Amino acid sequence: MVDKTNEAVTAVERAQNSAFKFGNERTEAMLRLQKELLEMYDQASRDWLTRLKSETELWSGLTTKLAETRSIPDAIKLYQDCILQRVEMAKADAQRVSDEWGGVMQKINRSLANGWSAGST
């Protein structure tokens, strides 16, 4: 009877250890994912601040150049150049957003593929 009790206790302890190990692995995986995502968000924030600075420089440069302009055709040319540059910046912005969210989705999908079920928290 004592042997059966000892076996039962041992089985319960193994099950508890296994469940604890499983939960610990999940927690560590979730924390790694959160850390990676936060690093990506941090880099994206720095990139967008740099981008905002470049747009500010674009428009203030236009203001400076317009103040020096002596003819309407020159002013129109400056506006055209500035708008063309802004369109290129918008194109780069769209690509950046696509790349950033693609990276986020890849990390999340990789985590799901590594054993996270969609319903787990």
Image (cartoon, rainbow, N blue to C red):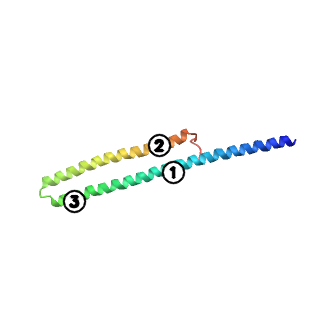
Q: Which mark is residue 35?
A: 1
Residue 114 to residue 47: above or below: above
The residue that appears at 52% across and 47% down in the rendered structure is 33
Q: Earlier in the sequence, mark 2 or mark 3?
A: 3
From the image, state whether disc 2 or disc 1 is nearer to you: 1
x 41%, y 51%: residue: 44
Pointer 2 or 1: first along the chain? 1
Classed neighbour count for the residue bearing mark 2: other residues with Cα under 10 Å, few (<14), some (14–19), many (≥20):
few
Identify the secondary structure beneath mark 1. helix
Residue type indicated by callout 2 = Met
Looking at this rendering, what residue extends furthest in the top direction?
113
Q: Residue at x 58, y 48 (%)?
A: 28
Say whether disc 3 or disc 1 marks the residue closer to the N-terminus. Answer: 1
Q: Disc 3 residue type? A: Thr
Taking 103 as reference, is 75 left or right?
left
Q: Which residue is mark 2?
A: 105
Label 3 sits on a secondary structure element that is helix
Residue appearing at x 60%, y 48% in the figure: 27
> In this rendering, would 30 be left or right of 71?
right
The reply to whether the C-beta atoms of the residues labelled 2 and 3 are less than 8 Å apart is no
Check the image and name the residue furthest to the right.
1
Question: Which residue is labeled 3 in the image?
Answer: 63
Q: Is residue 78 left or right of residue 21?
A: left
Q: Residues within 10 Å of mark 1 (few under 14, many from 20)?
A: few
How far, Cα to Cα, is label 2 from label 1?
15 Å
